[in-house]
Amino acid sequence: MFIVYGTKVMKKHMGTTHDEFRCAHCNNVRHYSITRVRKFFSLFWIPLIPYSSKYFVHCPVCDYGSEVKKDALENLINGPAIEATEQPEASTGAADTEFTNNTTDGF
């Protein structure tokens, strides 16, 4: 009798990012795809025990991207958490408020 064992890699699409990013490879502006890659110990070609998980964000057009930590996924999916620590002061003029654009143009 013989025992067949090894590893198997499984990929799962986890969703898309909240913000759009500019791809450094193809220069498209899109919501990046988030993918989880898990490695399993397999016995007789059946994946049984997961032993490694990695998360990647990548351009949906050219598949160029990078690995991200699991802690950063919540910010990528839902957007950054906004905390209201200070109340805005009432202003007398309507044109004295400045708005800034804090977007990220890629990784």
Image (cartoon, rainbow, N blue to C red):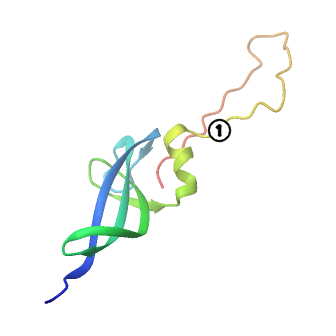
Q: Quadrant of the N terminus?
A: bottom left
Q: Position of residue 13 (x, y in %)?
A: 33, 49
Q: Amino acid at mark 1?
A: Ala
Q: Is residue 48 above or below residue 58?
A: below
Q: Element under label 1? A: loop
Total count of labels: 1
Q: In the image, is 19 to the left or to the right of 26?
A: right
Q: Quadrant of residue 8?
A: bottom left
Q: Position of residue 30 (x, y in %)?
A: 37, 40
**Residue at (25, 80) in percent of width and height:** 6
Q: Is residue 16 above or below residue 94?
A: below
Q: In the image, is 2 to the left or to the right of 27?
A: left
Viewer-proximal residue among 81 and 91:
81
Viewer-proximal residue among 14 and 18:
14
Q: Position of residue 80 (x, y in %)?
A: 61, 40
Q: In the image, is 88 to the left or to the right of 103?
A: right
Q: Which residue is mark 1?
A: 81
**Residue at (49, 42) in percent of width and height:** 77
Q: Residues within 10 Å of mark 1 (few under 14, many from 20)?
A: few
Looking at the image, the residue that sits furthest to the front is 1
Viewer-proximal residue among 92 and 57:
57
Q: Quadrant of residue 45?
A: bottom left
Q: Position of residue 82 (x, y in %)?
A: 68, 35
**Residue at (36, 62) in percent of width and height:** 37
